Amino acid sequence: RKEVEQDPGPFNVPEGATVAFNCTYSNSASQSFFWYRQDCRKEPKLLMSVYSSGNEDGRFTAQLNRASQYISLLIRDSKLSDSATYLCVVNVGNKLTFGGGTRVLVKP
Amino acid sequence: DAGVIQSPRHEVTEMGQEVTLRCKPISGHNSLFWYRQTMMRGLELLIYFNNNVPIDDSGMPEDRFSAKMPNASFSTLKIQPSEPRDSAVYFCASSGTGGRLEQYFGPGTRLTVT
């Protein structure tokens, strides 16, 4: 079983709609969690940190469920510019483990 | 402030040649990470340094790969000799102190070994 698993997608989302997707992790000792965004042929960029049960930043909401060992990301009012691959990242010690990413395509 | 700086941005070389990738972390950050990304394997951690000291190199694929961090503002990743299967995008990332574990990535070096 992979340490961090994500649905690769793609999630095809109409502009203005809400989309949500999950990430599961296997190591119960995981201490902190992040969502990164990666555009095609670009570097991953930090989207949100999730240190407690959840975090909200504008149209983006991340939730953490430690009992079930998953993190979710919800995007409201999707914009065309939200099209990207979203990487779930789990920290154990000082090491980050990246999921394979979920691809989101927002269409007009 | 400048972000993480990597050079070169693109490298095309022939099998058997030595390749050196360079990274300058964000000023004040004390941890530096080298990653490799391919379509097949995704993003993999190769090695990371804390205060210029290598902490975990378990991700380095084989002895052909080596990394150094001679000072707080510079690191290199060397492949010698290079092979076609080393073709990938190599990212450098850095993170700071004070319990902030967020990593900030450089633009990457796209390596093609023919």
Image (cartoon, rainbow, N blue to C red):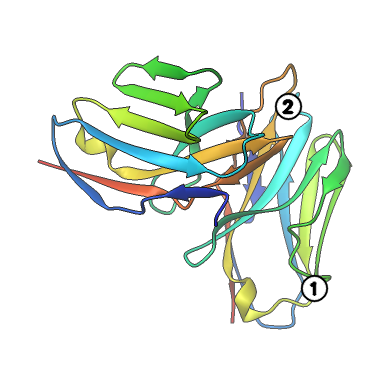
- Report the residue at 26% width, 36% height from top: A81
* Residue that numbered label 2 is attached to: B27
- Report the residue at 13% width, 35% height from top: A15
Count neighbours of disc 1 (C-alpha within 10 A) and say few if under 14, some if 14 to 19, many if 20 or more. Answer: some
Point out residue A8 in the picture as x, y percentages from the top left corner: 36, 54
Establish if B71 lies above or below B82. above
CA gap, disc 1 to disc 2?
A: 29 Å
Q: Can residue B111 be spotted in the picture? A: no
Chain under label 1? Answer: B
Count neighbours of disc 2 (C-alpha within 10 A) and say few if under 14, some if 14 to 19, many if 20 or more. Answer: some
Say which amino acid is labelled 1: Gln
- Quadrant in the rendering for residue B87: bottom right
Point out residue A103 in the picture as x, y percentages from the top left corner: 33, 49
Point out residue A41 in the picture as x, y percentages from the top left corner: 43, 54
- Report the residue at 48% width, 40% height from top: A88
Establish if A64 lies above or below B21. above
Say which amino acid is labelled 2: Ser
Q: Mark on residue A45?
A: none
